[in-house]
Amino acid sequence: MKEKIKRLREQKHMSQSDLARAIGVSRACVNNWEQGQGDPSRALLLPLAQVLGTTTDYLLDDHAPAA
């Protein structure tokens, strides 16, 4: 998931801080996800997918290639 979050965020020309503000978490949370040091909570998956313009299924599918 970490590669997908980073790639989609960068495609939207968003900083980690921009994404964090959009979903109501700290920049450190986004950084941790992108470094593979944890995953977003279930409550954050839908808002994260919406902001990134994708689906929760895509984010959760370990076999789907990064966008």
Image: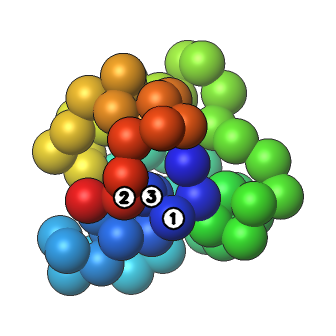
Residue behind mark 1: 3
Q: Residue at x 37, y 52 (%)?
A: 65
Q: Residue at x 62, y 66 (%)?
A: 34
Q: Residues within 10 Å of mark 1 (few under 14, many from 20)?
A: some
Rendered location of residue 12, percent (x, y):
17, 70
The local secondary structure at tag 2 comes to loop
Contact (CB < 8 A) between labels 1 and 2? Answer: yes
- Would you place residue 61 above or below residue 25 in this image? above
The local secondary structure at tag 3 comes to helix
- The label nearer to you, 3 versus 1, is 1
- The label nearer to you, 3 versus 2, is 2
Residue behind mark 2: 66
- Would you place residue 3 above or below residue 39 in this image? below
Quadrant in the rendering for residue 30:
bottom right
Query: Quick one: 13 or 18, which is closer to the camera?
Result: 13
Residue behind mark 3: 5
> Mark 1 or 2 closer to N-term?
1
Q: What amino acid type is highlighted by mark number 3?
A: Ile
Quadrant in the rendering for residue 39:
top right
Contact (CB < 8 A) between labels 3 and 2? Answer: no
Q: Residue at x 30, y 78 (%)?
A: 10
Residue 17 appears in the picture as rendered: no
> Mark 3 or 2 closer to N-term?
3
Mark 3 to mark 1 CA distance (whole Å):
6 Å
- Left/right placement of residue 5 relative to residue 26 reads left
Rendered location of residue 55, percent (x, y):
26, 29
Contact (CB < 8 A) between labels 3 and 1? Answer: yes
- Left/right placement of residue 24 relative to residue 33 reads left
Q: What amino acid type is highlighted by mark number 1?
A: Glu
